[in-house]
Image: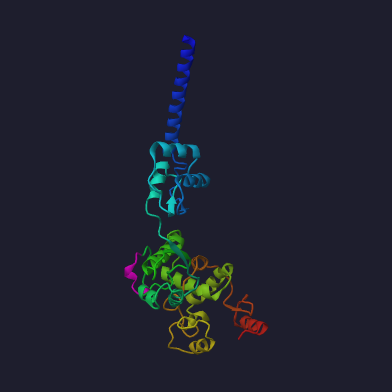
Amino acid sequence: MKKVLLAFLAIIILGLLGLVGTWRWVESSARSPVDAADTTGAEVDIIKGSTLQKIGAQLHELGYVPSLFAFKVYLKLHGAPEPKAGKHRLKKSMNLPELLTELAAAPLPDDIPITILEGWRIRDIDAFLAEKGLAPAGAYLEAVRTPSRFKLAFPFEAADLEGYLYPETFAVPRASPIDLNVLIQRQLDAFSERFYTPYKTEIDKCGRSLKDLVVMASLLEREEPKPEVRPKVAGLLFKRLDAKNPLGVDATSRYALADWNDRLAFLKQLRDPADPYNTRLHAGLPPGPIGAPSLPSLLAALKPEASEFWYYLHDSSQTIHFAKDAAGHEANRKKYNVY
């Protein structure tokens, strides 16, 4: 009888030790993040009506919870606040209590993607937003004409933000109309993050102002369709600029047109000596950028490729052909029927 009692007590003690061990393991697992280095995280969408058990399985599958068993036991011991449906930014540097707290907080705003294309002018962006019903016509134009409304992390000297409104897809909180200040600030931040900040040392040493680089990049964006060719075009155009020769970039004469592709208006503009953007008739860079340059164009302006060429033209397939002198250029004109 005594042996049976001792055996029974041993079983109880072992069971208690097992329970304590399990409890300690669950608590340790719950308090330990999966990856302390993950401070950025990702958006996780919690479907409306999801139970905590279903959410636990979702988090386990995504790698935020290493043990589904520990998750379930933790809930039994501590409970959890009611999660809110919607998108939440979760980080693997969060432990389980922090994850549950984040899921109970207000979800992220329901953002919509807005894609700004390379080369677009301010007026093009304004027209796009109005066409999509995202902002009243003229509202974007009005906003960018007051640069002091925004935080600029780079040198700036212009009346509006043309050229610095980085072309990319931006997530903007859904609203009608959208908050243009949010969109514009994100474009300006992207310009700084993609180009100005990482290349600041090179920009400071290149011998040209940031404005001149942005203006040249905007010309390259419209002038040369192939990004890999733009450094050579940049070298040629800077060589013309330094020699005080007209740049001869026809895209600049399209800048003021309501319709960029209006050929009759373009031909008229090419003959207008009063147009400060006419780089056939006026030497030097135009007064400002002619659109939003992409990173390849900005880098081409920053790192132009020297060459022996002074002239170029594009054939009907938009393939570029360079020439060393006027005679070579004229020969290319005849060969490719470009006049």
| Residue at the top extreme, as displayed | 2
- Place of residue 6 in the rendered image (x, y in percent of width and height, measured from the top left): 46, 13
From the viewer's side, name the closer residue of 128 and 194. 128
- Place of residue 329 in the rendered image (x, y in percent of width and height, measured from the top left): 61, 81
From the viewer's side, name the closer residue of 96 and 71. 71
Q: Residue at x 52, y 72 (%)?
A: 221
- Place of residue 70 in the rendered image (x, y in percent of width and height, measured from the top left): 47, 37
Q: Quadrant of residue 196?
A: bottom left
Question: Visible in this render: residue 196?
Answer: no
From the viewer's side, name the closer residue of 143 and 108. 108
Looking at the image, residue 191 lies above or below residue 51:
below
Question: Visible in this render: residue 256?
Answer: yes
Looking at the image, residue 55 lies above or below residue 4:
below
Q: Residue at x 38, y 38 (%)?
A: 78
Say whether residue 13 is magenta: no
Looking at the image, residue 183 lies above or below residue 286:
above
- Place of residue 283 in the rendered image (x, y in percent of width and height, measured from the top left): 46, 81
Q: Quadrant of the C terminus?
A: bottom right
| Residue at the left extreme, as displayed | 148
Q: Range of the magenta residues?
A: 144-151
Q: How many numbered discs sit on the rendered protein?
A: 0
Q: Residue at x 45, y 17 (%)?
A: 9
